[in-house]
Amino acid sequence: MELLLVVGLAVAVFVGFNIGGSSTGVAFGPAVGSNVVSKLGAAGLMTGFALLGGWTVGRNVIDTMGGDIVPADTFTLAASVGVLFFVGLALLVSNTFGVPASTSMTAVGAIAGLGVASGTLDWAVMGEIVVWWLVAPILAFWVCAVIGRYLYPYLDAAFPIEKSERSVVSLEGLRPRIADDATGRELVASALVVVIGCYMAFSAGASNVANAVAPLVGSDAITASNGVLLAGAAIGLGAFTIARRTLDTVGNDLTDLPLLAALIVEVVSASLITFLSTIGIPASLAVSATMSIVGLGWGRATRTVKATDVARRDVDAKVSMNALAADRPDEVPAMGEEDPDELVASDLFDPSTTARVVVLWVLTPSIAAVASWGLFSLIPLYTP
């Protein structure tokens, strides 16, 4: 039993470690790419705010995954290790294909497989989770589509935020030092990317700590508080080590997604996931962020056509999904007066790649659910 607990804790740390590695780049890539914080500073902020999110809002998600989808007494230590194994397997598959799989969706799928095999699955709770899985990305898309169509050009003109080629704020020991020639606009931009990065880290911790420890908490192998601390430490370990690569990738590859667009995407997706975590729904931050990007670009591109013209079918709407990277105009053109050709600057996303990502997001939790059901049907490791 003690050996099994060690294995369970090791798998939980592995899951948290990978979450920290991937989420740090998403949360603080814009800040590191803008030379506002260092990689070391990003790792420290990620660790602290992810732990804060897990300690506060994240407990609701732990309750759902550790005792609401299936009763807590269904979990044995062996069953918990089995569920965590499938989460780790999903991370392996996602790394192999280069696609950020949703650990939340995969963990829920594995728990659902256990519930079906044991006959204890709460279909009402599972149905509510699945409904939110469908609603959340649609909501993220349309909120960002509205922002892209009606607000983004004006925000871009009023608050031009660019990547800085220098460090506006630096640390001397533990004291921050502001560059002598720093402008007010640079300081505001620097503050924004750090604050929003911390908010993103909080959201990531709130939604993801349960993925690493909920089964162990449900089996009473560890307490919820100890589970949050364990997951937070594992996320921090990933943030200080393997996250450096994702910070390089996200922080230095912002030409396709301007800094303002990245901040809007982070605010919308983090707000949505924080809300879902508050009501105890495990959901994917990566899915919401991706749909936010697509929605923002689609909404921005549709400014070339008036809604009334589309309704009357008077025009052939030429819509480019490259709109977010277009040059900033001196004056924002009225709706329907923008030239579609001027919105083509660089690709925002590849439709074929997006389709592959969406397919794997659906496929990974489905495989986890089927594999979990098969394992627990053949080997009843759960409490009858």
Image: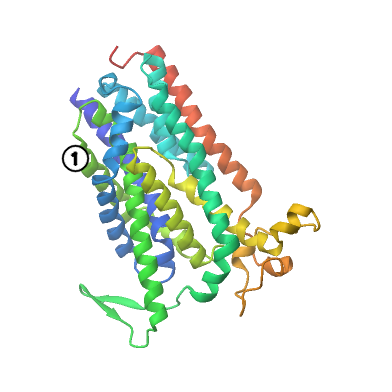
Residue 276 is situated, as x and y percent measured from the top left of the image, at 38, 42
Residue 119 is situated, as x and y percent measured from the top left of the image, at 38, 14
Q: Residue 167, can we see it?
A: no
Q: How many marks?
A: 1
In the image shown, does 91 or 211 lie closer to the viewer?
A: 211
> Residue 20 vs residue 233: left or right?
right
> Residue 267 vs residue 222: left or right?
right
In the image shown, does 16 or 218 lie closer to the viewer?
A: 218
Task: Return the residue at label 1.
Answer: 225
Quadrant housing residue 248: bottom left
Residue 294 is situated, as x and y percent measured from the top left of the image, at 58, 53
**Residue at x 45% of width, y 54% of height:** 268
In the image shown, does 1 or 73 lie closer to the viewer?
A: 73
Quick one: SS at disc 1?
Answer: helix
**Residue at x 58% of width, y 63% of height:** 150
Answer above or below: position of 119 versus 244. Answer: above
Q: Locate the C terminus and report the quarter of the image it occupies.
A: top left
**Residue at x 20% of width, y 27% of height:** 220
Quadrant housing residue 45: bottom left
Q: Residues within 10 Å of mark 1 (few under 14, many from 20)?
A: few
Quadrant housing residue 357: top right
Answer above or below: position of 258 versus 4. Answer: below
> Residue 355 vs residue 67: left or right?
right
Residue 148 is situated, as x and y percent measured from the top left of the image, at 57, 61
Q: Locate the N terminus and report the quarter of the image it occupies.
A: top left
Amino acid type indicated by mark 1: Ser
